[in-house]
Amino acid sequence: MRANNSLEIVDFESELEVSQAIADEVVELVTVNPFAKISFPTGSTLQKTYGILRDSARLGRFSLAKAQVFLLDEYVGLPRGSIDSYLSFISREIQEPCGLPLEALHFPDVHASDLHEASEKYEDLIRVVGGMDLQILGIGSNGHIGFNEPGTPLNSRTRVAHLAPETREANARYFNGDINMVPKRCITQGLSTILSAKKILLVATGLSKAGSVSALRTSRMTESLPATALLTHGDTRIFVDRQAYGNREFFLDGSQGGLRS
Ligand code: F6R
């Protein structure tokens, strides 16, 4: 393992080592501060980390009993209670198995009649509790964090956002490969909401993330690559495995705001 660069990148041999390191960070935070406020993402990148946390909880070595957990984002348009919702995902992966009381799991009300108001309420809640102690992030292959897609302004707050076509395509794997089933909208914490966290850990594993990691390492701050917003944050580290930190060269395609090899 080694750390370098201004946006501190910490690279590991394998996905398992990355997952263990992130789980260790969570356990350490909650050991020091059982009342910690933590925002977790969904998706495949963190699933091994969540598995390690569940194992630790089963062994009585870890508990979120006094913590507060916040969803990073949530789909708009799924039926209430859908197993594909991010609320269901975090409930299954983290909340129940790690002893987090239901009332300590916070999320935007994506079923409200006024989604704008619901977004503002969630933003206010995050502000009122004093922001996150720890924000954990995955990254999209187009460089998104949360569902802040390319083109999102740095000063964005929690709001209704549209998923980029490539994000819907990537997420179709959770909907039997049918892109038409993937919601088009979500409520996501904004970039400035994410940046209000005291500490941020971004996780990228696997070849499919090599492009965004490479662009993130070489790019200055640009709205075409939302993760570069993290350059303005004083306590961010990026944990990568060997595949995501490979030697392939990628370039930002300014006209599309995407990445090409
Ligand atoms: C999910 C989220 C997204 C994912 C990103 C990576 O709550 O906010 O930004 O973190 O799309 O997804 P995976 O880990 O599935 O590759």
Image (cartoon, helix red, strand yellow):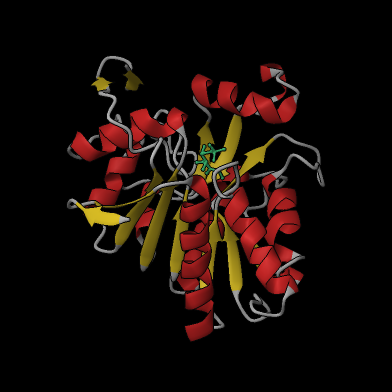
Is 34 situated above or below 12?
Answer: below
**The C terminus - image quarter:** top left
State the residue in front, 156 or 139. 139
Left or right: 153, with 119 as reference point: left
Quarter of image, res 34 = bottom right
Q: Which residue is drawn at 75% across and 50% down?
A: 88
Which one is in front, 90 or 121? 90
Asked whether residue 124 is in view, the answer is no
Number of numbered labels in the structure image: 0
Within the image, what quadrant is residue 184 found in? top right
Residue shown at the point (60%, 42%) measured from the top left: 43
> Residue 207 appears in which quarter of the rendering?
top left
The answer to whether residue 9 of the structure is visible from this angle is yes
What x and y, as percent, mark residue 102?
75, 69
Residue 163, image x, y percentages = 53, 29
Q: Which residue is drawn at 66% across and 71% down?
A: 56
Q: Residue at 29% of width from left, 25% of height from top?
A: 248
112 horizontally vs 126: left or right: right
Position of residue 242 relative to residue 11, above or below, is above
Q: Which of the pair 216/35 is nearer the observer?
A: 216
Image height of 227 relative to 72, above or below: above
Is residue 102 toward the left or the right of residue 37 in the image? Answer: right
